């Protein structure tokens, strides 16, 4: 009961803020909504007892990436509205309609899946040591998986970040 | 019901009130200490030795007219102070004032990370406040502030990782307990980290000598130049709350939190007569005093010096400290 | 309906995803398009975490970490490109970014 | 004796030193020392080896040394089934090769020493080159002599041919010299062709190439008294080789021309050693030849014919070296005559004595030429006796020896041959005696024209005669001061050789004169398959008295020759011209050497040229025509191909390009540059997939 209430509340807020993000006229407002959206998503993660991911979501997304967006929005002080010019060939509305159709289809799948209720409950992936029984151990377990089984992807991700950092510097510098 | 709702709500209420009162008194304390440092008396009119000044100031701010500039983005202008204050207060939910669950709202396994994450949200308030004012000095100040915040956050977080390595847990309660087990405060095991976190805390809270976002001589009032009344008060609160948070974190991580000095020495057992929350508050006040002391002592950095210190000194030292800690951890 | 199953999370995820897609398709401000992409990534993350919780398998959460890392890289480079582009063209309208076509 | 392989190798080392290092770095002295030193060492070794050989009992004088493997065993088909073709670097020392190595190294050393002075005018690199060639020649000659198989001998055989070519053409800037070199080489090729065919046949017949083994196998076979058997064919082919190398009819033409080379070369190669290789080879295969009497007859006839023909030509030649050259040819004819009549030992004996006196005569003539400042025409000499007494004396001894004056070496060896010829065939004997008389005549004609009479040569500075006739100075760098005695380095070898020419005959004093004919008994084992078997040709014998009578006749004939020469060139010098006028026809024929060169020129050379022209025409007309036709056809077909290529293939390619281009005009409208439209395309895909998923369930 409580769980359902929390979920529906969060879901409504998340979706509503998502719609606000894409519909806000001002980019700064979009960013604001996006931050709040991310924080709500983090709370959703907490309800799923994924504290580490939730904190990371706040720390990196809300505290890092979106700040970057905010900077850019502030730096790009536009002399004319960015949406002033529209190409005649763009398929925006068609795309939105088609996307809605996809959503309907997916929800259809979900509903039919719920009706069948043959979801693979309890099916566990291979190679994972134990269940997430104790929320207090979440971080430790993720660290364990990340630094043993997924060590190489982890290092690759770090390289990706390094490359992205260098790339961003190169792009942003006026003259190196 | 009692344990899940009533007690936490009570705790939150007490904590919020305590923090807000502490902030008001800290303003008074700052004024008094600065005055003494400059051989003045400070506020003397309201109450004995001006003690009631702490109550008068908030009342003044609440009663003042709340001005919104015409060119401002009103909505954001309103939200910005809230976004600044809320994270600062939220952080207190994980600060333990004693070993018993009664002394803290929550002890989560990612406590330290939580603090770092939530404080990083605080930057929005500053940026949005400066931007939404639609005025050049606040905008410049907010850019400065956010750049400074992000830069020093890296150094501080990296340093905190070395402390986490030492304690082996992210939980703040766990960190304190680790210091009990170690028999010594981490401030002695990690002196470099101690100093780094403190300096980083100075910068993150825009305190002297890193108070460039609020440099009156350059930017009149900083990012909240256009603010007044209650909204200004919120910014003000947030700033001082942040100072208290930093002090609390440093006290917990490096000075043993709620524990008395030398917790393993039986001869000092009489010190346990003083309750743990008093120990922690005492340590926090010690740091607050140091904050004010530094403000009274040191001149302001130049902006490029500030950035150079952050990126070329603190971050390398933090990384070096982390590496050495890791090596020692592996070897010992 | 009141029992929250992973399918609920999937539906939420799909809806957020589609919102992001619509944002990408409809808006012309490239910064907002980027933010829409972040929404899409978040939708994926919700799915991953939900399924991780349902399957009692931490790999989903590990992948969220990777997704966030990639998102950070993407944001850094993408916004760098936007800044560079803005410096030249004084615009962030995606419809004006069509110099390379025939 | 096991070190006999060093005997050829030492001069080889000298040649390598002089050739690889000396030409560039050695001064004349060093080059000379290297060459003479290696030769001297070789001679020393030869003497030791020979002494050891003599120390053995008569029928054990055979020593074979295998130094290294050359051709590993290869199975090859032979007459007697599959044989193993195997050739080692093996050397044989037996009486025949022992005598030969003494001759080669001994005379070789003397000529080396002589050359040191003779070639002194040459510039330094040419000097070293000369000694390199000379050493190389000795190396190959000794290889030829010592080789115990046909193939090793063949290597030496070809090697000496090469050195002969190099040394005849030593003054290669002189057209006639290089032509003579080429002539020698090419004429020799014909002989070598026969020789190598003979070797093939030997291997095919006997399955081995070892002389000793071949001899033993051949001894088992019957004598091919009537008709030509395989042995006869082998012998004939081998004899062709001998003809080429030893300048017999019809391949003698190269030897007189070879006199273009330096005189020591003529002495060493073209008188004493190389040209006798043919004789040596025939002697080496005496057993084979003994089994082919018909070929023996051919050998004798060719030898005799050569002896007479060369002698007649020698009568009228005026070039001092050419006279000697024809004399050499003639004497070689004698040797073949000896082998032809079965007197292998006599042939070898004459070979040895001839080596001494002919080398002596050549060196003497070289001394004269040297003194006359490179003048070779006897008509421009005369009266040199007073200027160069040593040369005169030694050459006189040589002439006496070759003429067959009793008690000199030529007398013993030549009379042995004549005696054996007499036993074989009296007609041959008569002709041989006539040839001997002619030999005496032309040799003394040479002596008289050169050393007696008046001086007819060119005048010299400070001397008598008029300056108008001053001879062109070839040397250019030194003035000629008239005829003079040669330096000590040249006269000493002359004296040594003169002593040899006198004494060499005494190893073979015939029984008729109270001797024991030691050389014949010494050499005998080399000519039979099994030692102690005894000689075949000892069928007939004359009494000592008859033998003495024959000697007397030949001595008389020789005396007559000498007398005629004396009368014609000393008493009445004009007689020679009178005779020449009186017998103008024969004289002209003789002067022109029977027109043999012209004949060869007209037949072989011209024939070859005409054939070559014909082939050239064929090549130019037919072959080139075919090639050009092919080319033209190719060009024509490629033109057609070009047209096809241009219109059909290119058309297709262009069609493809055109289709692509036209198609892309339509499709490029898809590329709007609107990123969101591309994203829309992705969404369409997603929609399709999700739909499929929904419906598919």
Image (cartoon, coloured by chain):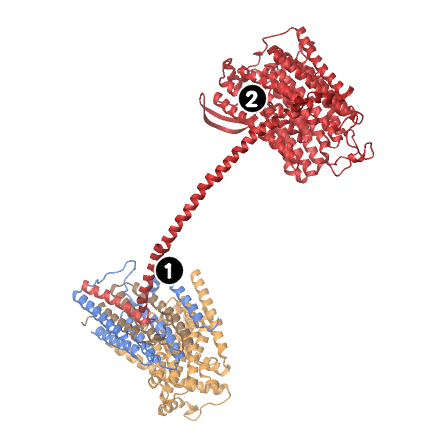
As drawn, the label of residue A152 is 1
Q: Nearer the viewer, residue C69 or C62?
A: C69
**x and y, in percent, of residue D177 in the image:** 65, 33
Q: Quadrant of residue D351?
A: top right
Label 2 sits on residue:
D239
Q: Vertical placement of B138 versus D677: above or below? A: below
Work out which quarter of the rendered image holds the C terminus of chain D and state it: bottom left
Q: Assess whether mark 2 and mark 1 are in contact (beta carbons under 8 angstroms).
A: no
Q: Residue furthest bottom?
A: B45
As drawn, the label of residue D8 is none
Rendered shade, chain D: red
Q: Nearer the viewer, residue D212 or A83?
A: D212
In this rendering, position of residue D308 left or right of residue C56: right
Q: Which chain is brown?
A: C
**x and y, in percent, of residue B316 in the image:** 47, 69
Q: Vertical placement of D484 versus D507: above or below? A: below
Residues packed near mark 2 inside 10 Å, few (<14), some (14 to 19) or many (20 plus): many
Rendered shade, chain A: blue
Residue drawn where x is 33% and y is 56% of the image: D652
Mark 2 element type: helix
Instruction: Please name which of the two marks, 1 or 2, marks the residue nearer to the observer.
Output: 2
The answer to whether one can see residue D239 in this image is yes
Q: Quadrant of residue B48?
A: bottom left
**x and y, in percent, of residue B196 in the image:** 46, 73
Q: CA distance from mark 1 to mark 2?
A: 91 Å
The answer to whether one can see residue C49 in this image is no
In this rendering, position of residue A174 left or right of residue D55: left
Rendered shade, chain B: orange
């Amino acid at each position: 009961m409580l769980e359902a209430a929390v979920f529906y509340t969060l879901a409504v807020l998340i979706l509503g803020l998502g719609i606000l993000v894409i519909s806000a006229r001002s980019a700064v407002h979009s960013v604001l909504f996006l931050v709040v959206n991310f924080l709500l998503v983090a709370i959703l993660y907490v309800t799923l007892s994924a504290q580490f991911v939730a904190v990371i979501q706040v720390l990196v997304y809300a505290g890092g990436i979106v700040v970057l967006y905010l900077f850019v929005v502030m730096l790009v002080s536009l002399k004319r509205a960015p949406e002033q010019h529209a190409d005649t060939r763009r398929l925006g509305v068609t795309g939105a309609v088609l996307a809605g159709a996809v959503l309907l289809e997916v929800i259809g799948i979900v509903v039919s899946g719920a009706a069948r209720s043959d979801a693979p409950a309890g099916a566990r992936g291979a190679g994972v040591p134990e269940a997430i029984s104790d929320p207090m151990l979440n971080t430790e377990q993720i660290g364990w998986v990340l630094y043993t089984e997924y060590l190489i992807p982890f290092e690759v991700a770090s390289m990706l970040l390094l490359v992205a950092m260098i790339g961003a510097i190169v792009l942003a510098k006026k003259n190196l | 019901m009692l344990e899940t709702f009533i007690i936490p709500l009570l705790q939150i209420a007490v904590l919020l009130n305590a923090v807000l009162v502490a902030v008001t008194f800290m303003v008074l304390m700052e004024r008094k200490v600065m005055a003494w440092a400059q051989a003045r008396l400070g506020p003397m009119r309201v109450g004995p030795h001006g003690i009631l000044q702490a109550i008068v100031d908030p009342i003044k701010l609440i009663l003042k007219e709340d001005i919104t500039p015409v060119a401002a983005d009103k909505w954001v202008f309103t939200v910005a102070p809230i976004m600044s204050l809320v994270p600062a207060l939220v952080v207190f939910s994980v600060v333990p004032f004693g070993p018993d669950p009664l002394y803290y709202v929550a002890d989560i396994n990612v406590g330290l990370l939580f603090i770092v994450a939530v404080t990083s949200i605080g930057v929005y308030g500053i940026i949005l406040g400066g931007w939404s004012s639609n005025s050049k000095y606040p905008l410049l100040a907010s850019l400065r502030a956010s750049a400074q915040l992000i830069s020093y956050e890296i150094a501080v977080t990296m340093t905190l990782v070395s402390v986490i390595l030492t304690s082996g847990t992210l939980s703040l309660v766990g960190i304190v307990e680790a210091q009990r087990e170690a028999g010594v405060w981490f401030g002695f095991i990690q002196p470099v980290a101690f100093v780094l976190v403190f300096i980083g805390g100075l910068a993150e809270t825009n305190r002297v000598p890193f108070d460039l976002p609020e440099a009156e001589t350059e930017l009149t009032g900083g990012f909240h130049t256009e603010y007044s009344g209650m909204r200004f008060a919120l910014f003000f609160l947030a700033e001082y709350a942040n100072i208290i948070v930093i002090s609390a974190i440093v006290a917990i991580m490096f000075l043993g939190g709620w524990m008395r000095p030398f917790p393993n020495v039986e001869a000092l057992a009489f010190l346990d007569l003083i309750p743990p929350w008093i120990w922690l508050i005492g340590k926090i006040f010690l740091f607050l005093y140091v904050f004010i002391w530094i403000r009274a002592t040191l001149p302001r950095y130049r902006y490029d010096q500030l950035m150079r210190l952050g990126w070329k000194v603190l971050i390398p030292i933090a990384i070096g400290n982390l590496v050495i800690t890791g090596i020692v951890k592996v070897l010992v | 309906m009141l029992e929250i199953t992973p399918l609920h999370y999937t539906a939420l995820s799909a809806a957020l995803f589609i919102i992001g897609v619509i944002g990408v398709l409809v808006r012309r401000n490239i910064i907002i398009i980027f933010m829409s992409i972040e929404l899409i990534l978040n939708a994926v993350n919700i799915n991953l975490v939900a399924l991780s919780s349902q399957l009692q398998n931490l790999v989903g959460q590990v992948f969220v970490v990777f997704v966030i890392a990639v998102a950070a890289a993407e944001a850094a480079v993408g916004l760098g490109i936007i800044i560079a582009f803005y410096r030249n063209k004084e615009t962030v309208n995606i419809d004006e970014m069509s110099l390379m076509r025939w | 004796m096991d070190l006999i392989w060093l005997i050829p190798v030492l001069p080889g080392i000298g040649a390598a030193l002089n050739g690889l290092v000396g030409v560039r770095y050695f001064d004349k002295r060093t080059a000379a020392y290297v060459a003479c030193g290696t030769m001297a060492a070789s001679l020393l070794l030869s003497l030791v080896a020979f002494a050891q050989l003599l120390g053995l009992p008569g029928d054990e004088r055979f020593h074979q040394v295998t130094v290294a493997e050359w051709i590993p065993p290869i199975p090859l088909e032979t007459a007697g089934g599959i044989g193993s073709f195997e050739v080692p670097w093996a050397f044989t020392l037996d009486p025949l090769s022992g005598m030969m190595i003494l001759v080669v190294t001994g005379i070789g050393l003397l000529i080396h020493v002589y050359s040191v002075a003779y070639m002194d005018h040459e510039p330094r690199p040419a000097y070293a080159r000369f000694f390199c060639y000379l050493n190389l020649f000795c190396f190959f000659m000794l290889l030829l002599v010592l080789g115990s198989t046909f193939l090793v001998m063949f290597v030496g055989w070809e090697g000496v041919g090469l050195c002969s070519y190099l040394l005849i053409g030593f003054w290669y800037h002189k057209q006639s010299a290089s032509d003579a070199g080429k002539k020698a080489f090419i004429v020799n090729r014909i002989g070598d062709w026969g020789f190598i065919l003979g070797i093939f046949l030997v291997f095919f017949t006997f399955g081995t190439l070892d002389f000793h083994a071949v001899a033993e196998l051949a001894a088992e076979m019957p004598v091919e008294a009537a008709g030509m058997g395989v042995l006869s064919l082998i012998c004939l082919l081998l004899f062709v080789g001998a003809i080429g190398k030893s300048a017999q009819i019809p391949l003698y033409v190269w030897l007189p021309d070879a006199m273009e080379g330096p005189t020591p070369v003529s002495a060493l190669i073209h008188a004493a050693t190389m040209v006798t290789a043919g004789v040596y080879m025939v002697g080496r295969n005496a057993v084979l030849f003994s089994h082919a009497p018909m070929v023996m007859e051919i050998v004798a006839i060719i030898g005799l014919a050569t002896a007479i023909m060369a002698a007649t030509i020698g009568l009228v030649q005026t070039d001092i070296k050419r006279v000697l050259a024809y004399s050499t040819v003639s004497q070689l004819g004698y040797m073949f005559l000896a082998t032809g009549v079965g007197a292998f030992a006599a042939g070898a004996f004459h070979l040895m004595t001839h080596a001494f006196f002919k080398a002596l005569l050549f060196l003497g003539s070289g001394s004269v030429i040297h003194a006359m400042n490179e003048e070779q025409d006897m008509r421009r000499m005369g009266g040199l006796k007073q200027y160069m007494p040593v040369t005169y004396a030694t050459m006189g001894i040589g002439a006496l020896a070759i003429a067959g004056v009793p008690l000199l070496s030529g007398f013993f060896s030549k009379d042995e041959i004549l005696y054996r010829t007499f036993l074989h065939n009296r007609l041959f004997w008569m002709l041989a005696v006539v040839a001997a008389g002619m030999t005496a005549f032309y040799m003394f004609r040479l002596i008289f024209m050169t050393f007696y009479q008046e001086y007819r040569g060119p005048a010299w500075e400070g001397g008598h005669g008029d300056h108008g006739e001053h001879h062109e100075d070839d040397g250019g760098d030194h003035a000629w001061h008239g005829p003079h005695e040669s330096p000590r380095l040249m006269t000493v070898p002359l004296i040594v050789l003169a002593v040899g020419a006198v004494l060499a005959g005494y190893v073979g004093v015939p029984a008729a004169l109270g001797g024991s004919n030691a050389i014949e008994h010494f050499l005998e084992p080399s000519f039979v398959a099994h030692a102690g078997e005894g000689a075949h040709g000892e069928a007939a014998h004359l009494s000592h008295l008859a033998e003495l009578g024959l000697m007397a006749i030949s001595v008389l004939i020789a005396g007559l020759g000498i007398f005629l020469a004396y009368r014609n060139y000393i008493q009445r010098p004009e007689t020679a011209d009178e005779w020449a006028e009186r017998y103008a026809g024969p004289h002209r024929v003789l002067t022109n050497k029977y027109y043999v060169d012209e004949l060869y020129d007209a037949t072989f050379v011209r024939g070859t040229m005409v054939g070559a022209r014909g082939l050239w025409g064929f090549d130019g007309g037919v072959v080139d025509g075919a090639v050009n036709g092919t080319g033209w056809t190719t060009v024509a077909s490629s033109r057609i191909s070009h047209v096809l290529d241009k219109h059909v293939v290119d058309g297709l390619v262009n069609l493809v390009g055109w289709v692509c281009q036209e198609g892309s005009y339509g499709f490029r409208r898809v590329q709007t540059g609107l990123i969101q439209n591309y994203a829309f395309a992705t969404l369409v895909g997603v929609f399709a997939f999700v739909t499929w998923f929904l419906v598919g369930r």
